[in-house]
Image: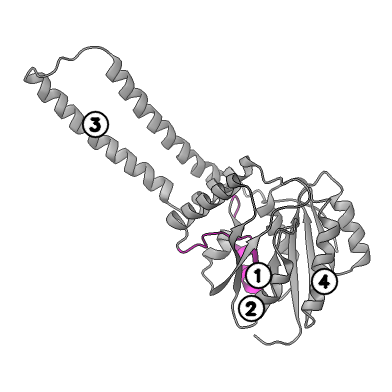
Amino acid sequence: MTTAKFKFSIVVPVYFNGLNIPITIPKLQGLQGLLPDCELEFVFVDDGSKDNSLQLLLEAKELDPRIKVIKLSRNFGSMSAIQAGLEYVTGDCVGIISADLQDPPELFRDMISLWQTGKKVVLATRSQRDESLSQRMFSNSYYYLLERFALENYPKGGFDFVLIDKQVVHEILEMKEKNTNIMSLIYWTGHERELIPYVRQERKLGKSRWTLSKKIKLFVDSFVSFSYMPIRFMSFIGLITAIISFFYGIFVTICTLFGLIELQGWTTIIALITFLLGIIMTMLGIIGEYLWRILDESRKRPSYIVDEVYK
């Protein structure tokens, strides 16, 4: 990569970030002093916010022509908002950062330095989190399972603060995947990457809209999109249950023939039937997750709908 003048686009998904935007925008604009050799472009995606986020973004745009604002018709989720932002970037490389400033924008300078050496993917990975114990436990468990059963060598602290080359942007957009994790998709592409560890800060302003239901959906999406583990797990449980049932049947038959036990009552039968039905219903639920995603893909509905673009 040459160190000549280049364009750097930053995608920022925005959802109920009215308190953060007046601080976030100046912080990002301040990167120009750290990156004098690049042309900056800011792409903010309003993901159906119901506060004053859009108004603040439009006011900032009036003062800075480098800002683009993409307004989605409703809340489609952060991953879809990032996809929408990637559609409108024009930079040679693209950074993705959240609007709440838990990730330090200054780190983009080091990330760009690595990109200039030829790295097409630079990940800022969380070595530590200034968050509550429950949040850390959920995140650590999620990323452990993702690395163990879906994406080998996935960063243990996870990441959603990243810089990618325009080639990777094109590849992600070409996939047109729905119900997926953009960060895991970037990792899945397999391009040579570099990791930069940092400490994720606690959110200081506003309330996080990253609810438990959204976390669970991301968890399910990640495993259904990148792993056969749930299906293989069902096959394994089904096989083990069949083997146990088979040998239990032989055991009961032999013991009955030799008068070692007396068959009586319905308790054992009811318990066994209930147990097996529970396994079957769980398996049907997992299969349903796959089938729903197949149906969703076959309908060809877009991951998001852009209501208006302010360039």
How far is the residue under mark 1 from the one under mark 3?
53 Å
Q: Amino acid at mark 3?
A: Ser
Q: In the image, 127: left or right of 2? A: left
Residue at left offset 71%, top offset 51%: 304
Q: In the depicted view, which residue is nearer to us: 85 or 158?
A: 158
Q: Amino acid at mark 2?
A: Trp
Return the residue at label 1: 163
Residue that mark 2 sits on: 115
Disc with the residue nearer the chain's start (2 vs 3): 2
At label 4, the amino acid type is Gly
Placement of 292 over or under 25, stated as above or below = above
Query: Can you identify the residue that label 4 sits on?
Result: 30
Relative image position of residue 79 (x, y in whole percent)? 66, 54
Q: Are marks 1 and 3 in contact (CB under 8 Å)?
A: no
> Range of the magenta residues?
153-179
Dot 2: within a 10 Å radius of its alpha carbon, few (fewer than 14), some, or many (20 or more) residues? Answer: many
Q: Residue at x 31, y 24 (%)?
A: 272
Q: Position of residue 92 (x, y in %)?
A: 71, 76
Q: Which mark is residue 245?
A: 3
Could you give the CA–CA distance between mark 4 and mark 3, rounded to whole angstroms?
67 Å
**Camera-nearest label, 1 or 4:** 4
Q: Can you tell which of label 2 and label 4 is closer to the viewer?
A: 4
Which percent across, then down, holds residue 200?
A: 65, 59
Foreground of the two, 21 or 185 = 21
Sequence-wise, the earlier of marks 1 and 4 is 4
How packed mark 4 is, by other alpha carbons closer than 10 Å (few <14, some 14-19, many 20 or more), is few
Q: Nearer the viewer, mark 1 or mark 3?
A: 1
Give the vertical position of 116 relative to 72 (above or below): below
